[in-house]
Amino acid sequence: VSNWCGYDLSVVDTATGKETRRVDIGRFPRGIAVAPDDSVAYVTAMGTSDIAVVDLKTYEVSWIKGVGEAPRSVALSPDGKTLYVTLNGEAEVKRIDTATREVTGEVVTGNQPRSMVLSQDGTALYVVNYADDTISKVRTSDMTERQELPTKHHPIGITYDRATRRVWVACYVGALMVFDDV
């Protein structure tokens, strides 16, 4: 669990519901993505331009530095080789190779891209653009925006329902929108 005001990450035992450890991250930790093999967690530090890489055995922290202004949400490809990050301060989504920690692609989606979700097969990202009241569909292979659709005011949350292939978007005005992934 990222602790925005505590500048750290809580590790919680899901069986007991008890916090077992805290890991210092820095200013405004937000998004978390855990590698498929549970070896590392990638955590955005939204008050920086960096992503923390937390070793889940030793809890040591290393960094992917200089990714961009205000990294917010992260998602991992199904094989764990590619990390995607929204940059709330730059209106971009970037693709990062987890082995080299280098940016391998980027796309401008909309103002203040916030939450995002990856399709089940990893071929598409769905990004909510908070300040533009839109959702973007991005093809991951070449980081091309394939579609942009309007939403209600200030879309903030998003999830992908694998069973129905639908994208659910929550907006601050109290609206919940459902889009078919076709």
Image (cartoon, rainbow, N blue to C red):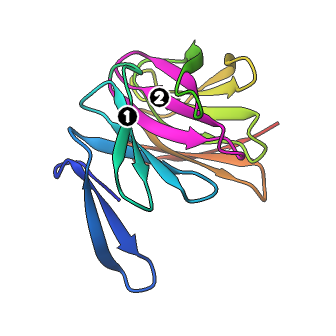
Q: Callout 1: 10 Å neighbours few (<14), some, many (20+)? A: some
Tell me the tag on residue 63: 1
Which numbered disc, 1 or 2, marks the residue that appears first in the sequence?
A: 1
Q: In terms of secondary structure, where does tag 2 sit?
A: strand
Figure check: 181 above or below 93: below
- Residue sitting at 72 percent across and 48 percent down? 166
- Residue sitting at 44 percent across and 59 percent down? 56
Tell me the tag on residue 4: none
Query: Which of the two marks, 1 or 2, is nearer to us in this view?
Result: 1
Mark 2 sits on what residue?
Answer: 86
Residue 114 visible in the snapshot: yes
Figure check: 43 above or below 58: above
Range drawn in magenta: 70-97
- Residue sitting at 52 percent across and 28 percent down? 101
Q: CA distance from mark 1 to mark 2?
A: 17 Å
The image quadrant of residue 50 is top left
Q: Name the kind of residue labelled 2 in the image.
A: Thr
* Whole-percent x, y for residue 182 in the image: 82, 36
Residue 52 colored magenta?
A: no
- Residue sitting at 38 percent across and 86 percent down? 16
The dominant secondary structure in magenta is: strand
